[in-house]
Structures are given as structure tokens and as C-alpha cells.
Image (spheres, coloured by chain):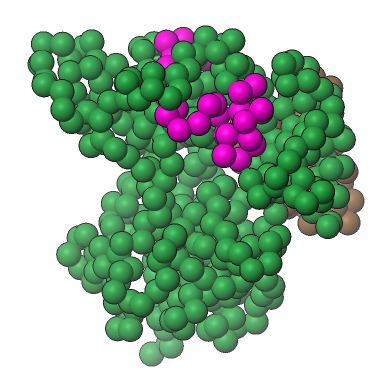
Chain colours: A brown, B green
């Protein structure tokens, strides 16, 4: 699975970086940075980040190459 | 004949109701779930109503609705009864009376009827000067976005989250914005205190907002009722939005012996203690505060609705005899908003604190970032961070983590 953020929806509120700091962060200008791939141990935090996003911009997409 | 699963009524089509429905169906897929919503829309992302403007040509209505879609509504096991208000509940007879004149008998019930805007004026009314509106639902937002897009003058009564996001949105659309706050000196004062509130007020004023307080605000308030109508001036009327707080939708539950003093009182598993098989979640649920022993809390935030809804669904599954992991609510308040480019993040419960301390930055330079902690008897009970960028975001996250672990 991969993390997918709809950047057109993202407004850089930063709630994801609080829920899952290993996977999301805001750079010094306040823009979201994230890594698509993640370790299994972060899954719970990422799900929390998905729920926390006030714009509902984050989802987990199954990577078709591993389907 | 195959055995039929239990029939579950969910009153409220917001995220709390949908989450409860989905959490139940995940554990008990033969349950028949009916969600009642008084809007003509399935669940959507409510926080997104005021988060950004829709400048494109074409239909802003469909643009807004499209942008607020959420994946979770795609669950074919749920039956939607939209445009249907639940007028009355008889919890001992387990029956709901509907605005469509029908009734609905249930085996289990989730109360997720939310809140409505507090208002002093009659909504939808026009006076000589204004068109009066409030903002809660998608239709309200569609109307307001349309009006703001026409770059009209807008007056907003109130200085809370909805009011400030609306002011910011209106400013982006190019409107002339006035904010009226009669009781406080600036935005979010009851939560963040006077100093931050005044700094935020200056921020709004720097961005072109006319911010009136006290008597001058009172003089500009309009209840919409006493003015004589002049039909010829209808095009001159400006938008007047009241965003002065909310009222829990509990009237339909009266007469059932529940504690409805501020929303619906539930226990830490979202169970309504007086009635077996009845649960409440979302903005309407008042539950034992996991961060302050002995007190109750009721919160109107997206994540609170998600977590209480999920738990209500799990608890319901468990009550129906299905294996379901149920643990006490642990929701940790963490919220954010953006006002004229300033991101404001708040975590914990600053309202319950008695002093504040600036960790980084200067309240006269909000754009450069200000990080604040709130103390209650010298213990940190809340943190807030305001910034145009994210200079201190890491430090803020560390403070939030420490607060959460306390």
C-alpha cells in the first residue's frame, strides 16, 4: 500500500504530521511533505492521520504493481 | 425463510452517524442500517465547507459538492432516508416518528443528530439591509459561496471558528468584510485568552476586516425582524451571517427521561445509560472527558465525530452480541484552522488552563510564528501554534506528544 494525498485538496493544516510524524511533515514554508511508502509499524498512525485530515485529502491506495 | 438481522436506526447523516453505521456493518454484516438525514445529501466533509474558495467558472455548487465527497459513503449495505427529519422518539416503544409522517421501528439506535447554529434572527429572512443566513449544511455553504463570489459586502456576527474561516473566505473572494463580536475583544478569546485573541484581531484588521466589538458591534447587529421591507432595494441587500455558536439537536428525544442538559449524556463507551441499545456520537454526545476526571465534554470537531462514531458502532455491535473490540473513548483534542494565511493549531484544553507562556515568537509578529503553552496549576494542559509557515512545527509536535502522554 501507498500513501496518496490529493494535493488539490490539501491546505497544509498539518494534522497528519501530528498523527503520523514519521510519514508526514510540514517544511519550513508550511507545505506538506510526505513519503508514499511506509513500514507496517506506522499503519495505525497513518490511519489516524487519514481520519484527522480536515480536508479528507489522504488515502491509502493499493499499489497495482503488488496487487 | 432466512433470519433477518437487527434493524438499526441512525439519526443524523453526518460523519458520526456514517462511522457508527460502517463500524457496525464491519462486524455484523447482516444488520440492516437506515441512516436518517434532514439534508438532501449523504455524508460529506463538513469542515471543508469554509476551507477554500471556488473561483472557477461553471457551477460552484457542484464544484463544492464534488470537493467534499468522502469515500466512506460508498457502502451499499446502508439505506439512506434523506430529506427526512426524525420528529420524535419513543425509546421505550423503540419507534421513531418521521417528518414524512411515517414511523420507524428499530432494534438499536444511534443518536448522531448533531447541532444547529444558534441564531437570533429568522434564517432566510430578508430585512431592509440584509439577507440573513447561518452556516451549517452544504446548501447553506453553496448559497454563501455564491453570494461571496459575487463580491458583495458581508457582515459576520461572532468570532469563533466558523466566523473566522468565513471572514477569511470572504476576504479571498474579494468581499468587504465586517465582523461583530459583542462579548469578547477578539477571536477565540474564551479558548485562547485575551492576549492571543487581541493579536488575532489585529491580524484580521491587517487583512482588511472591519472588526467591531462591544457597543459598536451591538449597534451594527441586526436581528432582521424590526426593519421595514423595501422591495425595491432587494439588490442592495448584503449578506449577514450569524456564527454565534450552536445548539444540540435533542428536542426530538424529550420525554424519554434522558439527560439532555447539553447534548445527550453518554458513558465512556457512547452508551446512553438510561436505555439499552441506544448510543450517541458526534457533536451531540456529551461524554466523560478522558483528560479531566470527573467532568463531561462535548466537542464539535471532525475527528471527535469520527472517533465517537466509530466507538458507538463498535459498542452497538458488542451489545448485539458480536465480537467487537470496545475501549473507552480517548479522543485527544487537536484542531487546526487557517485565517488569512495564518495556520492556527490548538491541542489539549487551553480553556481549562489558568495561565499561558510564550515558548517561541512574539504576538505582535504572528506571521513569524508564535508557539504558546497553557498551564493549569503549573502543569501544561494545552498548546497552540500560529504561523504563516511552519518554523516551529517540530517543536509544536513535540509539545503535543508530551501533552498526549501525560
Question: At 73% across and 41% down in the image, what residue appears?
Answer: B355
Q: Position of residue B303 (x, y in %)?
A: 62, 50
Q: Position of residue B179 (x, y in %)?
A: 44, 21
Q: Is residue B132 left or right of residue B8?
A: left
Instruction: Tell which of B326 and B154 is nearer to you.
Output: B154
Question: At 32% across and 52% down in the image, what residue appears?
Answer: B38
Q: Position of residue B276 (x, y in %)?
A: 46, 83
Q: Is residue B350 left or right of residue B161?
A: right
Instruction: Tell which of B14 and B240 is nearer to you.
Output: B240
Q: Which residues are magenta?
A: B172-199
**Magenta span includes A40:** no
Whether B290 is drawn above or below A57: the answer is below
Instruction: Tell which of B291 and B86 is nearer to you.
Output: B291
Question: At 70% across and 54% down in the image, what residue appears?
Answer: B332
Q: Position of residue B225 (x, y in %)?
A: 18, 30
**Magenta span includes B190:** yes
Q: Within the image, what quadrant is residue B154 found in? A: top left
Whether B39 is drawn above or below B253: the answer is above
Instruction: Tell which of B108 and B284 is nearer to you.
Output: B284
Number of numbered discs present?
0
Residue B206 in sight here: yes
- Give the quadrant of the C terminus of chain B: bottom right
Q: Is residue B211 left or right of residue B203?
A: left
Whether B131 is drawn above or below A45: the answer is above
Residue B8 in sight here: no
Question: At 49% across and 79% down in the image, what residue appears?
Answer: B273
- Give the quadrant of the N terminus of chain B: bottom left
Amino acid at each position: 500500500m501507498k500513501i496518496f494525498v490529493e494535493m488539490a485538496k490539501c491546505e497544509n493544516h498539518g494534522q497528519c504530521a501530528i498523527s503520523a510524524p514519521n510519514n508526514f511533515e510540514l517544511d519550513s514554508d508550511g507545505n506538506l511533505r510526505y513519503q508514499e511508502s511506509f513500514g507496517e509499524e506506522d499503519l495505525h498512525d497513518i490511519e489516524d492521520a487519514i481520519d484527522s485530515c480536515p480536508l479528507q485529502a489522504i488515502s491509502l491506495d493499493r499499489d497495482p504493481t503488488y496487487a | 425463510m432466512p433470519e433477518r438481522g437487527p434493524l438499526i436506526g441512525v439519526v443524523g447523516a453526518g460523519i458520526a452517524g456514517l462511522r457508527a453505521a460502517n463500524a457496525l456493518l464491519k462486524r455484523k454484516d447482516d444488520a440492516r442500517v437506515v441512516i436518517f438525514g434532514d439534508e438532501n445529501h449523504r455524508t460529506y466533509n463538513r469542515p471543508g465547507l469554509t476551507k477554500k474558495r471556488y473561483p472557477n467558472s461553471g457551477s460552484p455548487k457542484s464544484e463544492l459538492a464534488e470537493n467534499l465527497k468522502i469515500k466512506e459513503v460508498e457502502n451499499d449495505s446502508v439505506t439512506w432516508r434523506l430529506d427526512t427529519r426524525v420528529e420524535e422518539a419513543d425509546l421505550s416503544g423503540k419507534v421513531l416518528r418521521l417528518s414524512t409522517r411515517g414511523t420507524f421501528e428499530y432494534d438499536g439506535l444511534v443518536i448522531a443528530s448533531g447541532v444547529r447554529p444558534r441564531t437570533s434572527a429568522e434564517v432566510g429572512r430578508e430585512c431592509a439591509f440584509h439577507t440573513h443566513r447561518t452556516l451549517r449544511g452544504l446548501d447553506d455553504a453553496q448559497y454563501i459561496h455564491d453570494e461571496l463570489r459575487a463580491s458583495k459586502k458581508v457582515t459576520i456576527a461572532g468570532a469563533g471558528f466558523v466566523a473566522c474561516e468565513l471572514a477569511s473566505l470572504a476576504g479571498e473572494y474579494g468581499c468587504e468584510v465586517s465582523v461583530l463580536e459583542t462579548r469578547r475583544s477578539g477571536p477565540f478569546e474564551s479558548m485562547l485568552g485575551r492576549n492571543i485573541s487581541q493579536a488575532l484581531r489585529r491580524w484580521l484588521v491587517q487583512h482588511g476586516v472591519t472588526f467591531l466589538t462591544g457597543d459598536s458591534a451591538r449597534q451594527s447587529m441586526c436581528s432582521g425582524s424590526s426593519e421595514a421591507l423595501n422591495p425595491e432595494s432587494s439588490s442592495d441587500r448584503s449578506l449577514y451571517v450569524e456564527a454565534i455558536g450552536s445548539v444540540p439537536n435533542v428536542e426530538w428525544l424529550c420525554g424519554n427521561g434522558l439527560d439532555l442538559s447539553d447534548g445527550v449524556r453518554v458513558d465512556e463507551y457512547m452508551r446512553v445509560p438510561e436505555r439499552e441499545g441506544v448510543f450517541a456520537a458526534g457533536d451531540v454526545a456529551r461524554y466523560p472527558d478522558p483528560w479531566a476526571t470527573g467532568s463531561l465534554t462535548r466537542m464539535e470537531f471532525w475527528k471527535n465525530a469520527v472517533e465517537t462514531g466509530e466507538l458507538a458502532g463498535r459498542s452497538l455491535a458488542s451489545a448485539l452480541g458480536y465480537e467487537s473490540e470496545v475501549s473507552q473513548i480517548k479522543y485527544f483534542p487537536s484542531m487546526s484552522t487557517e485565517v488569512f494565511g495564518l495556520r492556527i493549531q490548538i491541542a489539549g484544553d487551553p480553556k481549562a488552563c489558568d495561565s499561558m507562556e510564550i515558548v517561541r515568537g512574539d504576538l505582535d509578529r504572528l506571521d513569524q510564528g508564535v508557539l504558546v503553552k497553557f498551564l493549569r496549576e503549573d502543569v501544561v494542559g494545552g498548546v497552540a501554534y500560529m504561523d504563516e509557515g511552519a518554523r516551529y512545527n517540530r517543536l509544536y509536535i513535540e509539545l503535543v506528544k508530551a501533552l498526549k502522554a501525560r
